[in-house]
Image: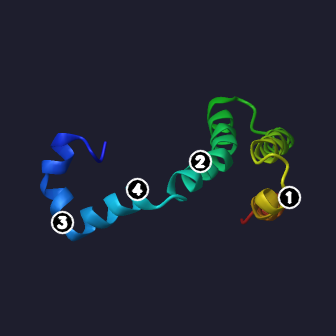
């Protein structure tokens, strides 16, 4: 994509920002592994959003069940390395507690 003839000839490629982007993508050895990591974490969460949006079930118990499945999927995708998934699971759990309190005490 970034070495494609039309891309190389475009005005975006000649700008300072364009050159910085090309340098990051083509020269940063960690760029694609970080992208892969982001996809591994976000894919299970996107599935949860899709399920919640497309299902008739809106009970909190159903939400907790699919979130638990998402957490397990994240752990699996990150090869069960606690150092890799710990922060993501902590954030998901913290957000779940906040959501449950909001549903328990609705604002009138």
Proximity of marks 1 and 2: CB atoms separated by less than 8 Å? no
- Would you place residue 107 above or below residue 3 in this image? below
Q: What crowding class fits label 1: few (fewer than 14 Cα within 10 Å), some (14-19), or many (20 or more)?
A: few
Q: Identify the residue at image location x=85%, y=58%.
A: 82
Judging from the image, what secondary structure is the residue with disc 4 in?
A: helix
Which callout, 3 or 4, points at the residue further toward the start of the chain? 3
Judging from the image, what secondary structure is the residue with disc 2 in?
A: helix
Which callout, 1 or 4, points at the residue further toward the start of the chain? 4
Q: Quadrant of the N terminus?
A: top left
* Distance (Cα) linking label 1 and label 3: 41 Å
* Distance (Cα) linking label 1 and label 4: 28 Å
Which callout, 2 or 4, points at the residue further toward the start of the chain? 4
Quarter holding residue 100: bottom right
Which callout, 1 or 2, points at the residue further toward the start of the chain? 2
* Distance (Cα) linking label 1 and label 2: 18 Å
Q: Is residue 96 visible?
A: no
Q: What crowding class fits label 3: few (fewer than 14 Cα within 10 Å), some (14-19), or many (20 or more)?
A: few
Front residue of 79 and 23: 23
- Would you place residue 107 above or below residue 48 in this image? below
Please identify the residue farthest to the bottom as the structure is shown. 16
Residue 53 horizontal/vertical position (percent):
62, 36
**Label 4 belongs to which residue?**
25
Instruction: Report the disc number at residue 82.
Output: 1
* Distance (Cα) linking label 2 and label 4: 13 Å
Judging from the image, what secondary structure is the residue with disc 1 in?
A: helix
Q: How many numbered badges does the structure rendering display?
A: 4
Front residue of 80 and 71: 80
Proximity of marks 2 and 4: CB atoms separated by less than 8 Å? no
Residue 43 horizontal/vertical position (percent):
64, 42
Q: Is residue 43 visible?
A: yes
Instruction: Report the disc number at residue 36.
Output: 2
**Label 3 belongs to which residue?**
15
């Amino acid at each position: 994509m970034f070495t494609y003839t039309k891309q190389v000839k475009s005005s975006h490629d000649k700008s300072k920002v364009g050159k910085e982007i090309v340098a990051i993508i083509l020269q940063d050895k960690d760029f694609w592994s970080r992208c892969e990591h982001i996809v591994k974490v976000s894919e299970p969460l996107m599935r949860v959003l899709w399920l919640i949006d497309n299902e008739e079930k809106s009970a909190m118990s159903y939400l907790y069940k699919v979130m638990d499945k998402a957490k397990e999927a994240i752990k699996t995708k990150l090869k069960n390395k606690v150092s890799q998934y710990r922060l993501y699971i902590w954030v998901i759990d913290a957000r779940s507690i906040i959501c449950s309190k909001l549903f328990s005490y609705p604002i009138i």
